[in-house]
Every structure is written in C-alpha cells, then in structure tokens.
Amino acid sequence: MHHQRLFQSLLFPLLWATLATTQKLNENTFKLKESSYNPYITPLSQLLPKASVLDVLASTNHDLVAEDVRAIGMNYKATRWENSASFNDFGTTSWYPQGISTSADAYDAGTYEGKHVTLVSWYDARDVPTAENKGVRIAFVDRDKSPDAYRYVLLVEPYDNAGSVDFRSVKVHAGGIAWYGNSLYVVDTSRGFRVFDLTQIWKVESGDGIGRKAGGGFSAAGYAYVLPQSRTYTATDPPTPSLRFSFVSLDRTTTPDSLLIGEYQTASDPEPRRFVRWSIDYTNRQLVTDSAGVATATWAYQVNIDRMQGVNSINGKFYISRSNGGSNGDLITWVPGNLAKIAAGAAPEGPEDLSYDKTSGLMYTVTEPVNGRYILPFDPTVLP
C-alpha cells in the first residue's frame, strides 16, 4: 500500500562522531568502461515470449504482511516477507535480501506504468557447487495491491553456449540495486555494475535447470520469468586498493542525476571506506561516458565508517545505514565538512541498501537477518 505512513520519535541516543582521516579524493581515479549492448538478447528475444513489468505484477504469487517494527526511538510501519506453511522468505537460509529500489527511482513521477513498485534483490546463499548456484532473484513488489504482493524474476546473463544462444545465472552478491527508467543497475562487488533491460523480461517454461532444456525450450530453476543482463560497467585502471561496489543508490537531487556507491568494510579491514559518484544520462539511462566509452566519477570521498550497508544523498546530505552484527543497526547522517551524527540502534538488526522516494518523502531499507526480514519505510527528516 503506497500510502502507508509511519510514526517516529526522537528518543534514540544521538552520538556525534568525527570520521577519522576523512578526505576528499581525486574523482578522476575512478573510471568504468562501458560494454556494448549484449548481442545475444536479440536472438533470444525471438525465441522467448516477452513479458512486461505489469505482466509480472499482475501474476504476483506471494503476499507481504503489514507489521509494526520497533527500534530505538523509531516505530516503522513495515511489511514482512511471506512466512507461510508452503513458503518462507522470512526465515529461509537459502536466500538473503540485499538491495532495494523503487519506481520513484525509475521515474521522477514516482510510478512505473502507473504503478507504485518496489524491487528487492536476493542472492543464493546455499553451500552448493558453483554450477548449481541460482545467482540472484528480484522481488517485484506491487504496493498498490492490498496487501502488498510480490513475484520473483531471476536475473540471467545471455551468452553463446557452443554456438547456441543461451542464458545462465548471475552469480553476484547484489548488495545494492538502482532502478532507472527501463534499466536496473546491480552492483558487482569487485567489478562495477551489471545492467538489466526491463523491456526484455521473458516468460520461460517450468524446469529445474537454468537456460536451454535438453528437450527444447528454456527454464529458470522454477521461476516463471527471467530478466537479462544487457551491459556492464567494469572498473578500468583501478586504484590501489581497488574499489568495492558494496551498495548503490540513485540521487535525483544532483544535476544530472547520479549513481552513488559505497564500500562495506569491517573494523579489522585495513582498506578505506569510500563513496564515489557517477553521472547518469536520463535520455538513454546509461552512465555519462567519453568518446572511448569510459565513465569517470564526478565526486569521491573517504569516510572511514565501518560496516556501511547503504547510502542515499539528498541535496548534499548523506544518509547511511550501518549493521552491528546481531544488534540493532544505526542510521547515520553526514554533510561533508561536518561531524557525522549517529542515531544509535535506530534501525532493526541488519539494515541493508537504501532508496529514497521524493514523491512521498520516505526512505526505504530492507533487513537481512533470518526471521527478521522487512521492508522498512521511514522519514529521513526525523534524523538529526
């Protein structure tokens, strides 16, 4: 229900913190090489029936449950993933939620084809041989239904399989996603971005395998729909240490719009903790590149905040989610050149990626822990 609201107080402990060795970085250090559009999408699109985002939403097969979730000083009007006798997203150890983005990222109006939609990435966490790993699935959540309802679409990479066009699973952590127009950007931790074309959702047949079936046709490990990878942005001439693409958000308050990524590091990790921003072109939904197809960052900063899981920026103010192991997470605000302000314990355990909807004024996060998985909206203006 897209009109949901939440009630919050300012009773959480507030900590003021300096960010050790915080410094502006040379943005020219961070470059990404754009690939061409995946050449195998066109032949596959001639073999597979096409579906739309609206088709996926019309066929939702799982419900979210509205639930009040409390943290220190915060009361979230949340939604909980399905936990029924036949299907348990709330407590499964096979899949873990990570990234979140909404139709307010996709289009400035806040809707996609007239619908209020949330996308959430889940990665396959099973201890299985690589060949059996299903990769990443995306929950398409229809927030205009009552209750909110969702269906999964499997991410796939089209490729040449011994002379035949085929697709395979996308084995990344998917720690952050950003939906922009018909493009879905997914972080690939050590490489950059993978981009998926939402105009090319395909309907597949039943079957346990992913890709071509021995008897003909295509399947996707039991999922009815697949979303193909259309291009990549890969770090070129990376700095030392190389940048980790741990999470991403879209910032519609910059000109032009931009993608902002950050790095997750634990306290014992010696590597820096950085934010880096790239401009994005609204006319083609691709990063702004030079004539050689290289996207150079427009802003970079070292912040050195441990265990960051997500970031949004709104008119130059940064909102950061931080995990604290098995304890409540923190929500942090920061303006470059100033002290960070930490709302300690203001998030439930395991907050992940962040996404901002300026049409409603709400920010969203998703939580990861087994039996503690929610989509959480909150008003960022209540934070210091």
Image (cartoon, rainbow, N blue to C red):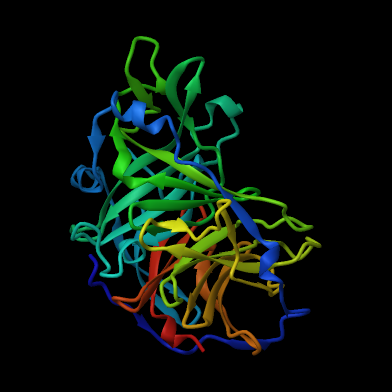
Task: List the single residue furthest toward the front.
Answer: 291
Q: How many labels does the image show?
A: 0
Q: In terms of depth relative to the viewer, which is nearer, 87 or 122?
A: 122
Task: Where is residue 60? Give x, y as percent.
Answer: 23, 45
Splitting the image into 4 quarters, where does residue 220 fall? Answer: top left
Give the position of the N terminus as an image quadrant.
Answer: bottom left
Splitting the image into 4 quarters, where does residue 19 fall? Answer: bottom right
Q: In terms of depth relative to the viewer, which is nearer, 132 or 188?
A: 188
Task: Where is residue 129? Give x, y as percent.
Answer: 60, 26
Residue shown at 32% from the left, 66% from the top = 104
Residue 384 visible to an observer of this rendering: yes
Splitting the image into 4 quarters, where does residue 202 fall? Answer: top left
Residue 373 visible to an observer of this rendering: no
Residue 66 as seen in the image, left or right of residue 280: left
Residue shown at 42% from the left, 45% from the top = 196
Residue shown at 28% from the left, 49% from the top = 150
Relative to 366, does residue 85 appear above or below in the rendering?
above
